[in-house]
Structures are given as C-alpha cells and as structure tokens.
Image (cartoon, grey):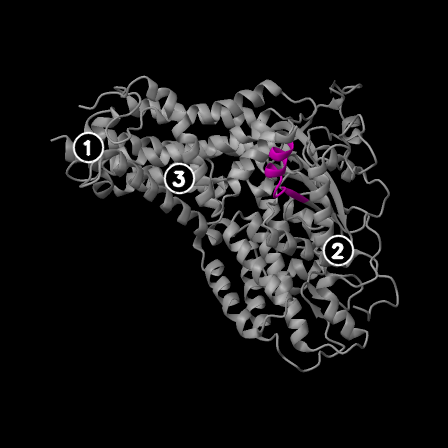
Amino acid sequence: MADSAPLWAAAALPLLLAPAALAVACADGRSVAPVREVLRLLVQQPRRTRAADALATRTGTVLLPLAAVLAAAVVPLGATPVSDLGDGVVWFNAMEALAWAAVWLTGWGPNSTLSLVGGYRFLAQGLAYEIPHMLALTTAALGAGSLRVTEIADAQRGLWFAVWMPAAFALYLLSAAAMSFWGPFGQPAGRDLAGGVATELTGVGRLLLLGGRRLLLLTSAAMAVPLFLGGGHGPLLPGWAWTLVKTGAVLALLLWLRRRLPGVRMDRYTELSWVVLTPLAVLQALVVAVVVLP
Amino acid sequence: MELRSALLRAALARPAVLTAVLPGATRARLAVERELRARRWPRVLSPAAADLLVVVGRPGEDEPAWLEGTWQALSEPRALVRVEEAADAGAVLDAGHAALLRGGPRTGTAAGGPRPHHASPVTDPGHLDHAHADHMAAHSHDSPMLISGLPLADRADDRDGLRLDRLHVPFGPVLPDWPAGLVVRLALQGDVVQEVTGVELVPAAPEPRPAFWDEPWRRAAAGAPVTRGEAARRRCAAHLDSLGRLLAVADWPDAATRARRLRDAALADAPAAELAYPARRLARRVGRSRTLRWLTSGIGVLPRERALAAGVGGPALEADGDVWRRTVQWLAEAVRAAEACEDPRPLPPGDPYGPRGELTGEQPPSRALLDVLPSLLHGAELAAARLTLASLDPDPDELLPVAAGEVARG
C-alpha cells in the first residue's frame, strides 16, 4: 500500500509540471520556440476588448492550469501520488471537467465572436468525448475493483490493462487529446477561428490558457500510465523512471498521431462518438465486468 | 533598464508576425512567407497574439479603417511595416524588427497616432459590435439597447425555426489562410451561417501586372514567348498554394507545410524530377486520408450543372462535388502539372485554361467562384463554411483591374 507523498510535494508539483509541459511543447514544435514564446508573453502588455467581461476571462485562464495541476495530484510518480485519495479516479475526472468551465469562460469573456464560437466548440466537444471517456475510466476502476489510483496500478502487476482492455485504452487516449483541446481535437482554438478561445488573449492570460492546455495534455497522458500501463511497475528501473518513460511513450504516440490527422470537427465526431464509441466502451466495460466478477 | 532591454531583446528575438495581405500582392506575399520561414519567425493567427503587423500590398485608401482596427488590436510592444515589392521583403522585416526592439515612439502607426476608439465595422473581425443599423431598424424597439456603445444582437428564426440571437459579423480581411483582402459579411446564429449579407474586397491600388497565378497565360495571349513547362509550373504552384490554405483551414499543419514547401520549390525552378516525386507523395498522403475524406465529404457541394450555370470553370467544375472532390482534383492536377513542368514546347497564345478556369471569358474565373459562395455557405457551420471557401479559393488578384498595355511585361 503506497502512502501519499509528504506535504512539500504539493508545492513541488507545479514546479515539476511546468517545465515538463514546456518540454512537451518543444517536442511538439520540434524547436525551442515555446521557451521564447513564454518570455515574449511575459513582456507583452495586456489588452482588453470593448465591453469585455474581464472577470470571466481571468477566472477561465487561471482555472485551466489550476485544474490540470489539481488533477495531477492523484497521478502517482512511481508508486506515490501527491495525494492518494480513496476515490482518485473520480477526483481526476472532476478536475478535468473543470476545464469545461475554464474554456467556456475564456471564450465568453472577451466579447468576441471568434472566441465565443471557440467556447461553443469546446462544449460540443465535451458532449462528444466525455461519455466514452468516463466509461474508459470506469472500466479501469472496475478491472482493479477500486477507485484508488495506486490500487489500479498495483492490480496490473501481472498484466497491463492496456493489453486486455484495448478499446478502453484507445478511447482514453482519444479523450486525452480531446480534453486538452489539442492536436486533432484543437478546434476550440482552431486556425479557422483565428485561434478560437485564444483569439483575443494577450500576455499572461494567453500564457495561462495555452500553458494550461499543455499541462492538461501532460497530466492526462501521465494518468494513462497508472490506469492502463501498469503504473511504476517494471524491471530494473525504479518506479518513478518507469512512470516517466511510459508517459513519454504515450506523449510520443499522441504527437505522432497529430502529424497524421487533420482537425476533427464535432459535427462529424459526435455522431461517431455516440453511435460507435459509446457502445464500444459499454461493451468493453461489460467484458471486464464478466471477467472480474465471478 | 539594462536588464529590461536585454529581456525585451531576448523575448523579441523572433517576433510573432501577423500578415495583412491586399489583393494584387501575391508576389510580395510569397516573398514574405519565404522570408519568415527562413528566419523561423512564428506566424500568429490574430492581432492580439502578434508583435509585428506586416501589411503586404498597396491599400487603395489612405487610412483604411480595417487596418487601423487591426493595428489597434495589437498590444505593446508592437510595430507595423509595409511590404509593397517582393524584393523588399527581407529589408522591411529587418526594419520592423529594429523598430520593435527600439521601443519608445512607434514608427509605424497605421494612421499616424492612437485613436480613442478602436472598433469599426470591418476592423476586428469578430467583435459583437456589428449589428448593422439597417437590421436594427427592422426590429420592433425604437432605440436599440446599447452596451458600451455597442448594439445588442438582434433575433431571427434559425434553421430549425427557433428564435435565436443573430450576429452580423464581417469575416476578413485579416484572417489566417484567407483570400487576400476578402470580406465576407455573415449573419451568424451560434456558429451556423444563417445568411451571407455581402461579399466584397477591400480597395487596393491597381496593379500594373496581371494576376500572378494567371501570368503565363496572360503573357502568351499578349504574344510573349511562354513555354508549356512554364505554365505547368505556375499551375502546379497555384494548386499547391490553394492546397496549403485548405489543409491549414482543415487544421492539418503538417500536410499544409508540405504543400507550401513544395509550392516554393516549384516557383524556385526546381527540376521536374524533384517536384513530381514529392507531389505524388503529398497526393498519396492527403488523397488517401480517410479522416480528411470523412471530414470534408458532403460539405460545400457544387454539382456540375450548378457550376456551369454559375459560370464556374477549372478544377471546381471538373471536381463536380464537395470539398473532398475538389481537394482530390487539385492534388491530381498538381501532380500532372509537376510532371509536365519541363515541357519546352511553346504555349499556344489561345490557351485559355488558367489554374482557376478559362481566362478568355468576359469575367475572370474567380468572379464566378465568389458568386456561388453565398448559396454554398447558407446554413453551414462556420468550420464547414471556411472549408468551402478554401476549397474554391477565389483569387482576389484576378478581380483587380489591370492597367492597360502592361500585360506583356512581367
């Protein structure tokens, strides 16, 4: 039974996540441009649009990275998360649902059509990805008979969940990209909307939103490790190193997918999600239930 | 102060650039794009994200309101530069970078100084302040409610008969991957286009040379010696340019970058062997993408009969269908043209087929493409509307009047 990390780990978590998210951004762009971009946004003056709801924008942009860091609190590094909650999976899902509010508020705030439409798009995206996503989380919890993330990881000492529940794993990966509105699921901040929810953001607000999005991607990729890839378990290397290696592999897979796929529009994806992916997720959960509940 | 300036220098080592392109400036745009890629300066999507506003081409007015609005939407530190000739691109970007680093008094305000208000109808393509007065007048209340000087949205029935807020929003002229200087006025409900209320171009100074993409055919028609290979090369680059825009709008940056690199190689006189192979690879990767096919089928459908009736020619006519069919048509034509780009035979002066259709008609092919636009966008989601426009890709250069007697130059 793993314990929670000492209290100082809570303060260290954002300090660990931020550089890691920056590294992911660099790998995505295959350059160090994101480092310069951070600096550039820090010197940029904030600007407001007319009749803007500044409180909404500020709340939204602060909430997004906050939600990502809070979600990361239950992700174990090796065997130890910052907080080993008894219902860690539910906590993770709740924090990641905060992103809905964050993105919508950011889209609403600036009083701009493009940014508002970006906000709509994220809500539509949420409706499309969330149900298969929750079923995938449930399936992993069902397989381990626990909502505690460390126990789910421990249940995979023998066989990774990714191997015997592949559909749940694949759906989880899709929703990892979708919840962080990144890559093929980046339409809420899409090019065709001149940046969507980020259109009107300047300076620190922009940094928080775009950085928060990377943090969310990193956190959800890292969560795939205890849920489906055996957590910190592995030969030779210590647990924390296995967590990092596996997270890196998940991210590499997502980045590769990004290069192969165009942006997915929700007017098409929702149909796929409800007609094909949701029944598939239910079926996967049923199979797992039959196996583990004799 | 020293630290501050060092920080500024590091932060702006590669300024973020937003381009505002005017009709008739394709040569200069291509030069700017090449230059930016070589310098690895990031290109951003909106004024708020930009440090450096690069105006490409010659506006037809002294102080265009749209430019002023765009400029006002940039936040400090910021600079504005103008590129009028392709050859000046590098020097002008250097000057912009220097102005940005200097800080202090800005060299390049759009209208010579800050103005108290920064929203005018065509300017920032997105604020909810564009409910037109005439539409407001059709409404029952006598004095429209204003919030911070902006009228509220009006209402109308949506496509399902629900009474919803309706916004009047001009799209363009400063949008990424958008035809130069085009303004499409949309009545939006949520993200659904209820109606296209206007399609126009911002005024640009008349160009002495013919439209860049039509140049070989225009020159041949005027009696200048032009080879078939030269024309094929231009057609190949024109389609790759269109594909680059379409793939970028479809949010597939990897494929869009490939198309644009290949376009620049074609224009830089790369040998046919070096063009044809990557062109076939691009056609394979994009043409066999099931995801793209699934996402672009069934939108912006323009059947052959309707295209003919509207006077549309070229790939949009041949494709006889939706966004996907037009994409595949461009890919096939680009590959064919890449293979033919060393054909030394002369182009017959009567050859009328430019990249977008017949050039001998009464009006340029892009006029017909713009004319069919409103009916294709009606009832479409915004994302589908943008894909439809990008898959037709009207060339605003063709719509500029050409100064007489200059056609053979070039």
Residue B362 visible to an observer of this rendering:
yes
Residue corresponding to mark 1: A289
Q: Quadrant of the N terminus of chain A?
A: top left
In percent of width and height, residue A99 lies at: 46, 27
Extent of the magenta region = B5-18
Q: Quadrant of the C terminus of chain A?
A: top left
Q: Examine the image and state in which quarter residue B342 appears.
A: bottom right
Q: Give the residue drawn at x 42%, y 39%.
A: A177
Residue corresponding to mark 2: B88
Q: Examine the image and state in which quarter residue B365 appears.
A: bottom right
Residue B173 visible to an observer of this rendering:
no
In percent of width and height, residue A100 lies at: 47, 27
- Residue that lies at the very extreme toward the left in this rendered image: A294
Rate crowding at label 1 as few (under 14), some (14 to 19) or many (20 or more) other CA atoms within 10 Å: some
- Describe the element under mark 1 as helix, strand or loop: helix
Q: CA distance from mark 2 to mark 1?
A: 69 Å
In percent of width and height, residue A91 lies at: 34, 22
* Nearer the camera: disc 2 or disc 1: 2
- Residue that lies at the very extreme toward the right in this rendered image: B404
Q: What's under tag 2, amino acid-wise?
A: Asp
Q: What's under tag 1, amino acid-wise?
A: Ala
Residue corresponding to mark 3: A273
Rate crowding at label 2 as few (under 14), some (14 to 19) or many (20 or more) other CA atoms within 10 Å: some
* Nearer the camera: disc 3 or disc 2: 2
